[in-house]
Amino acid sequence: MIDLKDTRPHCSDLVRRASAVITRRDFRGSSTPLSVSRTRPPITPHGMHTGCSVKRRADTFASMTTPNRPVSLILDTDIGDDVDDVFALLLAVRDPAYDLRAVTVVYGQVGARARLARHVLDLAGRPDIPVAIGSSASLAGPVNPGDRGNSMASADEVMPGSGSREWDDLGARIDPRTASELIIELVRNATVPPVLAAIGPLTNIAQVLTQAPDIATRVAALVIMGGRLGEGSDVGEHNLNMDPDAAAIVLGSTAPIRLGTFDVTRDAVLGHDDVERLRAGDLACQSAGDQLALYLRRRNRPETSMYDPAAMTLAINDDYLRTEMLDIALDVDVPGRKVITRVDAGLPGAVKMQTSIAIDVPAFHAHLMNTITGTPASE
Ligand SMILES: [Ca+2]
């Protein structure tokens, strides 16, 4: 996901805010106010709501997973653009709490994304995990090559070059099934319900739920990095904005959603100090360090957010992200490619989701780096 500096017109003329403030408590006992916008439905010819009836989801996650057993995980990713996806992928194969069963890729340059995922898994010693290609286009049609997020900004200088022998070899070992075929097959054949984690635009997941509605109730959880609450929520969030139609389908479904939002996960960061530690590790760590360094240089920033691996921890527990069951309402503006998420139990269409409200930043950073590198931080 991308830290957007949105230059598009805001929809402040479409929404009226009423003040509503919940308290965001971090794990160290202090309290920080977190504003949550309460907005009326947009009055716009292009706006629409999810239109679903109000659903009351119980958080069935605990009852569908087995304590002390790894969580079976399927990861759907737009790896290669923002660098946080590669850290989610490495965390998924190096934390024994996960049993990563498959990786599927989505959005824009899916051939390159699949090769990158294959490359990283090979470096991590996991050539056995299948990688399948999903939708390049959004549900509305082909993505604009200039779209934010349709790049390989964190990886194109790090992975084998297009047309090289290594590139061809990676391509030859991509799973022949489509992303939705692979997801549906794995979920339906699982003896223990898996967790489906989506850390990119939601096109593949929407296609799965459209083709096979039973998947919504067969997964232990649908973990999503997406949405933005509180200040800045009027510009939406990248993963939902890039395919608003898919977001409406997925977030309006009956799947037990655990939502890691932009406003919480952005506080988890890696920066230049972490690059050297990664480069001192094995081949997979070195590649991740190179991708992080490339991304920081291209974006000219000292650190960057780890939205995706932070959200992905919701597949395991709430140790790093604290969550509450909140009523999340959507305003979906397809032509504007903007999906506004807000907490509003009163709005028709609001859906209950286990939603992030706070993050333990130091604990998550230590967990991510220690797990990926396999070593504790030096004093
Ligand atoms: Ca992502």
Image (cartoon, rainbow, N blue to C red):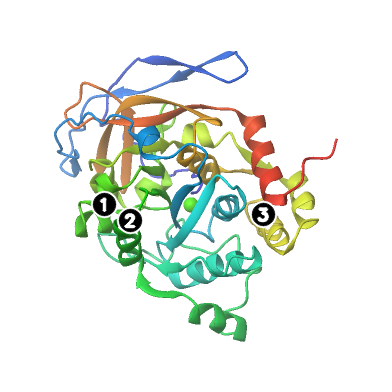
Q: Which residue is mark 1?
A: 215
Q: Is residue 167 left or right of residue 52?
A: right
- Residue 155 vs 292, above or below: the answer is below
Q: CA distance from mark 2 to mark 1?
A: 7 Å
Residue 130 in the image, given as x and y percentages of width and height: 47, 68
Of callouts 1 and 3, the N-terminal one: 1
Q: Nearer the viewer, residue 69 or 50?
A: 69
Category of crowding for the residue at label 1, using alpha-carbon neighbours closer than 10 angstroms: few (below 14), some (14–19), many (at least 20): many
Question: Is label 2 or label 3 in front?
Answer: 2
Residue 99 in the image, given as x and y percentages of width and height: 51, 52
Helix, strand or loop at mark 2: helix
Helix, strand or loop at mark 1: helix
State the mark number for residue 292: 3
Residue for point 43% across, 52% down: 200
Residue for point 56% across, 82% down: 169
Q: Which residue is mark 2?
A: 187
Residue 118 in the image, given as x and y percentages of width and height: 54, 69
Q: Is residue 87 left or right of residue 311?
A: right
Q: Can you tell which quarter of the image residue 339 is in?
A: top left
Give yes or no for contact between labels 2 and 1 (Cβ–Cβ under 8 Å).
Answer: yes
Question: Is label 1 or label 3 in front?
Answer: 1
Of callouts 2 and 3, the N-terminal one: 2
Residue for point 20% across, 56% down: 210
| Residue 145 shows in the view | yes
| Residue 335 shows in the view | no
Q: CA distance from mark 2 to mark 3?
A: 32 Å
